[in-house]
Image: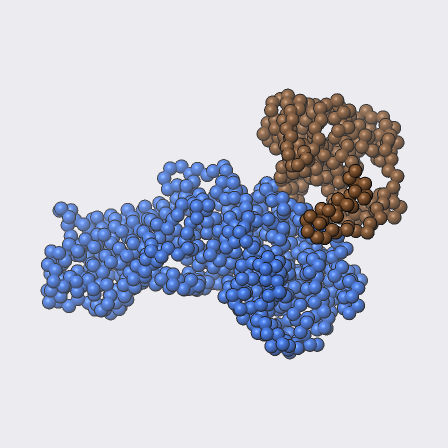
Chain colours: A brown, B blue
Amino acid sequence: MDILVCVKRVPDTAENEIEVNSDGTDIERDDLVYSVNEWDNYAVEEALQIRDKVGGSVTVISVGDEESEEVLRREMAMGADGGILLSDDAFEGSDGRGVAAILKAAAEQGNYDLILTGAMADDGAAQVGGMLAAMLDRPFASLVNHIEVVDDGKLKVGREIEGGNQEMNEIDLPCVLSIQTGINEPRYVGIRGIRKVASLEIPVRGAGDLGIDPSSVGAAGAKVKRLEYFVPDLGEGAEILEGSTEEVIEKLIEILKAQGGIK
Amino acid sequence: MNPVLTAPAEATFLGFPMAVFYFLLPVAGVALFVYIMARRMAPLVRAAPDPRLDHPGERFRLMLKYAVGQYRHPRYLLPGLLHIALFAGFMVLSLRSITLIMTGFVEGYTLPGLGGMTGEIYSVLKDVAATVVLIAAGLAMIRRGVFKPERYDVPAEAGIRDHSWEAVLVLALICTLVTCDMLFEGSLDAALRQAGEHPELVVPGTGRWLFGNLFATASTSTLQAWHLGSFFVHNVVFFFFLNFLPMGKHFHVITSLPNVFLMKLKKGVIKPVRWGVSDDQLDELDSFGVKKFEDFTWKHMLDFYSCVDCGRCADQCPAYAVKRPLAPRFISIKCRDYAFEHYPLRGDIHPSDEPLIGSILSEDEIWSCTTCGACEAECPVFIEYIDKIVDLRRGMVEDGMVPQSLQKPLRALEKRGNPWGKLEKKRLAWSTDKEFAAECQVKVLDKKTSAETLYFVDSITSYDDRMQSIAQCTARILTALGVDFGILGRAEKDSGNEVRRFGEEMLFQELKTQNTEAIAASGVRRIVTADPHAFNTLKNEYPDSLPPVQHISQFLAERVRSGELKFKALDADERIYTYHDPCYLGRHNDVYDDPRRVLDAIAGLRRVDMRESRDRSFCCGGGGLMLFYEPEEEQRMGVLRVEMARKAGASVIVTACPFCLVNIEDAIKVAGLEGKMEAIDLAELVARQMEV
């Protein structure tokens, strides 16, 4: 099975302090460390496990700049067979739809049975996976936490739903899945692993290579524009209800009624 | 002279001259033994290299002290004394054994030098030795068979067979050997007396004397039968015993002296990934660490052979005490049994393709170790465990088998130089805190600012809210003592002690390089730290070009001795204090007395030592990356430690390591002893009581 996994280089929320910059246009990026988006990393691990079970290949792909190469290389150190960087000045400022369009063009250049994306990115809106599937006209399942290969044409996928229950679905190949964290335990990639792939080639494809009209992507083609970035005003804090369980429930019902929460 | 009894060399059996048998027996016995030893050496010759012949004089001295002198054995008093008796007896009786073998085909044989007076003295010695050995072996068998000490238990989860029967069998064989000699001698003594002749000197109370008396009225033919029969049994059992030794835990009889001679001389250092490959050549290696059995060095394989299965290591192991899936002893026995199975005495050698982790060893087993070194401090034959565990971890890291709980801090160390992923610029926040900075200025070393001494703070003391107090106290102490010091601030990275011990060798090399460059650029001439983990690696594993490193307790002890550091008396504190020896200060670096000297200089401080102190100190739970690991255990090591303090009558635990402080303070809460037990760092106590 030939698998394409879309990965994104994002600021690491664990190892950074995120602050809004002085203009209110973006977060302060000076002192940030970046790494692969956590959901994408789970997706790559899943792809590797599927490949190791049924054979095939795993290719990682990213829309970014030359810094994104480090992320592709890390996933290759993890075990991916190859990486592709989609980079072009014209891609900058793309909204979710733009990113999906770029990925679609690249996906059509290959012959992939399965395309995986992370369910969301630390700094994203959880939309690229679904949009990509729609553009490719392929079936899509989101928030997948379990994958079983039934045969060449079908997968069984699981998703967690309300109440901690699990839903199992069958989906035809080729398809697109967005992967939820916790689907597996990703293997560790150390400095040594990364050094081993340091000299492998990662092809770069721009708008021309992909046959994309630059005005349809990037800031130029964005249909969603960011207006402002700000930290919301802090409220007064929480009101803690005291008393026995019955007393607390009574008070709560009163408050909800008064605030229009219960009719 | 007409012999009173027929000597073995003259005896015949159904017409067959027994001398021939007694000649062929040692020939066959020794030949078989040589063959077995050669087969046992097979895996060692294809193992990884390990240079162990440096400092031969020192090695010989240590071998005399620990292997011949059995210096560690009395740490478990009764079994230790029993073993010393057996070993000493063994040494004395070895000459007798040779004599008995030769007597089988050379009548009346005496070893050169053992004729005449010397021979008689030796004869007395060996009779006493044989009797002592018989009593000791008898007691040991009762201890093993009847009382069954817990230390020898092999629980079902261990995944190995119980080898205890070997102990009882060998003790029985030993009893047989010495009893046969007593019978052999006693029967001849009785015959000589009956014939009116004098036997040589027999000490009353020995076994030989006992049998001589029991045989007093026996007929000559009876005596003859016992005389020749006991000789036969002795020689046959001797060669059976010799060839049984390499079959199990009694291989140590042969390998213990060499194993001790070849011991690891330098403490506190982890072995290189591969001996002979320098740090900058590491990238060229195909594979890191131990994944298959053959990846071990030959010395580590010798260690497996030498394991006596005594369980002293596991008995001291804190991981085993809290029921983590680790006992050092079982690692040795499992690997030894693996070697026996795949490198058999007969048939083809068939090394397995399967990696060790996942077959005979488990991931959790290897991650559970805190590298405290209690096992290595206890083992009477100096088996090394830490290097093996680190090598196994190196292999797992390379193959990506790292627990999720450790992956995050490792990544954070890579990106931010500390396991919490906090910003580099916050590393000196403790020193710029308004209240603190008002009373104590701390220099940050850079191109423009230099100092004579570097205070290496390391990660936990820099970033942890509670541990920052140690940094502030240490800074106050250094300032009060007029030391010209500074910190590296942003440029300081985690010392990497645990990074290396958890198998991420390349990350350790990077941290080491970055720190070494920063230290060299700062121009300092001395380094002081309050973190024993940093102390250990800076002193033992960083390049020799680094300035000399001291732990704060050593620094303070010097100044207590010189009189420069004086303390206010402890006022109205009726509590009993106890000092907890941190593993990386005590066992790994032999700093036991300096912290105690400092505490004892505080008038009014009542101090006791826990039973488990100095090199028997019980690990608090581990430091560095170990704080992040989520083990399977029945309780925390720290809780056991707090219990030990309580049992010693103490209600204040003083320690000299931030990780110990974290673990012990947590444990006090978990054990429900808040308010009844307090933990404090040495630097905090000194800062409070010092008078300058």
Indicate the position of residue B451 as horizontal and vertical percent values.
74, 66
Indicate the position of residue B178 as horizontal and vertical percent values.
26, 58
Is residue B615 visible from the viewing direction of this image?
Answer: no
Side (left or right) of B103 relative to B80: left
Side (left or right) of A92 relative to B15: right
Residue at 41%, 57% in the rendered image: B257
How many marks are shown on the rendered structure? 0
Above-or-below relation of B295 to B609: above
Q: Nearer the viewer, residue A208 or A261?
A: A261
Q: Nearer the viewer, residue A94 or B345?
A: A94
Residue at 67%, 65% in the rendered image: B528
Above-or-below relation of B558 to B61: below
Q: Which image quarter: residue B604?
A: bottom right
Side (left or right) of B531 relative to A222: left
Indicate the position of residue B19 as horizontal and vertical percent values.
19, 51
Quadrant in which the C terminus of chain B appears = bottom right
Residue at 71%, 59% in the rendered image: B465
Quadrant in which the N terminus of chain B appears = bottom left
Residue at 29%, 50% in the rendered image: B239
Side (left or right) of A10 relative to A56: right
Is residue B599 visible from the viewing direction of this image?
Answer: yes
Q: Which image quarter: residue B80?
A: bottom left
Indicate the position of residue A221 as horizontal and vertical percent values.
87, 30
Q: Nearer the viewer, residue B50 or B577?
A: B577
Above-or-below relation of B166 to A168: below
